[in-house]
Image: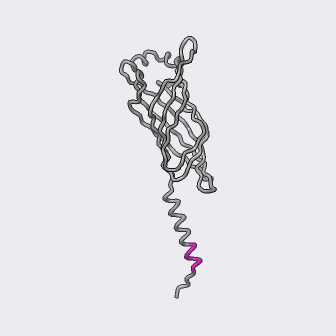
């Protein structure tokens, strides 16, 4: 005859439920999509003029938990040279949601001047390739338990340098979750 108890059954059911919850809650990488680039002003930087722009980025949190992230800076590159930076302010995002971030950036005309021949060729083709990288750190909170995370994002964006339209883009994000 088998000895059976309610305590053992409840412990087994709780363990199975917790295991299923952990397996189904595997963190997913967030997605990023550059929607637009808008020039807001020009700043005199003798002998040239720097451009201040706002990058509108669509961000999706596909996870079942809200996230809170700290402020950071995105680096923007043209032809392998640092063209400028965009400020990412600290914030949060609800679970399973999308939101638009408006990132102020300043682009150096001095760097573009160093690549004048290539810039003119890009304007003639109406295609300019920009690369951007950013590391976003924060906390994903599950009830009282906070998990630190780091997301490394790399973007390869083709824009029309005349109208600043986004022509094509490839974005890659890698999520690193810290359990300790």
Residue sitting at x 52%, y 68%: 16
Residue sitting at x 43%, y 25%: 164
- Relative to 163, residue 156 above or below: below
Q: Is residue 8 magenta?
A: yes
Give the colour scheme of this rendering.
one colour
Residue 35: image location, x then y, percent = 44, 34
Residue 102: image location, x then y, percent = 52, 33
- Relative to 54, residue 118 above or below: above
Q: Which residues are magenta?
A: 6-11
Is 168 left or right of 48, judged from the image as shown?
Answer: left
Identify the main secondary structure in magenta: helix
Residue 132: image location, x then y, percent = 50, 32
Residue sitting at x 55%, y 72%: 12
Residue 96: image location, x then y, percent = 49, 50
Viewer-proximal residue, 36 or 82?
36
**Residue 75 falls in image quadrant:** top right
């Amino acid at each position: 005859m088998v000895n059976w108890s309610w305590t053992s059954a409840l412990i087994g059911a709780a363990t199975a439920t917790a295991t299923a919850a952990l397996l189904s809650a595997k963190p997913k990488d967030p997605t990023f999509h550059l929607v637009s680039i808008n020039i807001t002003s020009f700043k005199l930087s003798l002998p040239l003029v720097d451009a201040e722009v706002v990058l509108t980025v669509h961000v999706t949190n596909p996870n079942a938990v809200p996230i809170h992230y700290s402020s950071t800076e995105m680096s923007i590159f043209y032809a392998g040279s640092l063209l400028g930076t965009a400020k990412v302010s600290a914030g949060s995002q609800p679970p399973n949601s999308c939101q638009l971030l408006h990132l102020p950036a300043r682009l150096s005309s001095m760097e573009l001047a160093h690549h004048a021949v290539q810039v003119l060729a890009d304007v003639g083709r109406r295609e300019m390739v920009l690369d951007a990288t950013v590391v976003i750190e924060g906390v994903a909170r599950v009830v009282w338990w906070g998990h630190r995370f780091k997301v490394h994002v790399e973007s390869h964006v083709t824009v029309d340098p005349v109208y600043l339209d986004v022509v094509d883009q490839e974005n890659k994000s890698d999520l690193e979750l810290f359990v300790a």
